[in-house]
């Protein structure tokens, strides 16, 4: 059954599906009155809905059955990535959404090769959010991950202040054989906790950036003996979190 995220709330029995999703339902899936879809709202509520009306502008649906089960990770994980080049961030957002990330915050690192163009910012962030939405629908997420516009490191540390756990995936720790911090953190995580993880761009994080993060109570960790690419490290981490908090419970 197709899943769609709607604006607003599903508290009322009737809801509207608009925009590209309206076109997808009527023109691509060729659904009609009586067809059923799954709708999720901005509060994480999901329900099986039946289509009551289709127009050029919207699809009106009625709630048939509320879905109590959730496909979300039991912990809230934010992925902070130093701006990488090319379409690597798009891959992180797409696959990271499938793996359960709650939020993505790109940041402008000192070794980021790509230069952030403020003139193209809105269009770029809209594309990233669309990628997250499509991945969330495909993987039957109940929550649509937020994707931020890139921030500076100082802003990043402020955004992380309220988190229960804060980690830096640092390749120098991996080279030195550090292998316990991620494991220790996962062992301490409880359902409902929040985890903020920072990953560097292709050139890694500078000593100055590491010092700034550790001064704000971030802890460095290795991700095993192999050095991972900037687009691989977040996916490795999310997979480890899923295994530890979902499959081992």
Image (cartoon, grey):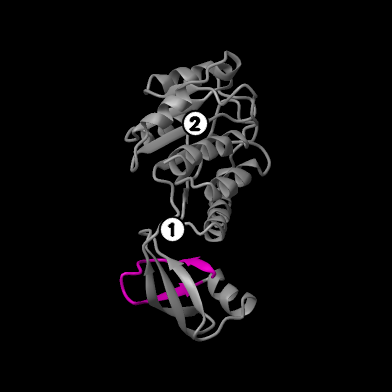
Examine the rendering and report whether any part of residue 106 can be seen.
Answer: no
Image quadrant in which you'd find residue 126: bottom right
Residue 164's label in the rendered image is none
Examine the rendering and report whether any part of residue 104 can be seen.
Answer: yes
Q: 26 and 185: which one is in front?
A: 185
Q: 213 and 192: which one is in front?
A: 192
Q: Which residue is painted at 52% across and 56% down in the image? A: 136
Mark 1 highlights which residue?
A: 142
16 up-or-down from 232: above or below? below
Residue 53 falls left or right of residue 82: left
Q: Quadrant of the N terminus?
A: bottom right
Mark 2 highlights which residue?
A: 198
Q: Residue furthest right?
A: 86
Please tell me whether residue 209 belongs to the stretch shown in magenta. Answer: no
Residue 13 falls left or right of residue 199: left
Q: 96 and 89: which one is in front?
A: 96
Q: Which residue is painted at 48% across and 43% down in the image? A: 247
Q: Secondary structure at mark 2?
A: strand
Q: Which residue is painted at 60% across and 30% down in the image? A: 201
Magenta-drawn segment = 1-18
């Amino acid at each position: 059954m197709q899943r769609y995220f709607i604006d607003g709330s599903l508290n009322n029995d009737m809801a509207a599906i608009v925009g590209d999703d309206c076109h997808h339902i009527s023109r691509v899936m060729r659904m009609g009155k009586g067809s059923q879809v799954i709708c999720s709202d901005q509060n994480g509520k999901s329900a099986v809905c039946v289509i009551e009306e289709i127009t050029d502008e919207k699809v009106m649906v009625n709630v048939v059955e509320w879905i109590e089960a959730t496909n979300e990770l039991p912990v809230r994980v934010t992925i902070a990535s130093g701006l990488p080049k090319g379409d690597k961030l798009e891959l992180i957002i797409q696959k990271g959404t499938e793996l359960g990330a709650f939020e993505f915050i790109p940041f402008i690192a000192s070794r980021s090769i790509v230069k952030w163009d403020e003139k193209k910012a809105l269009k770029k962030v809209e594309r990233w959010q669309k990628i997250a939405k499509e991945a969330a629908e495909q993987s039957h997420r109940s929550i649509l991950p937020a994707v931020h516009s890139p921030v500076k490191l100082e802003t990043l540390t402020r955004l992380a202040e309220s988190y229960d756990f804060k980690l830096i995936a640092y390749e120098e720790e991996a080279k030195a054989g550090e292998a316990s911090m991620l494991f220790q953190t996962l062992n301490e995580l409880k359902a409902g906790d929040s985890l903020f993880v920072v990953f560097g761009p292709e050139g890694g994080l500078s000593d100055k950036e590491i010092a700034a993060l550790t001064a704000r109570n971030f802890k460095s960790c290795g991700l095993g003996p192999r050095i991972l690419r900037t687009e691989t490290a977040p996916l490795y981490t999310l997979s480890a979190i899923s295994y530890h908090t979902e499959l081992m419970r």
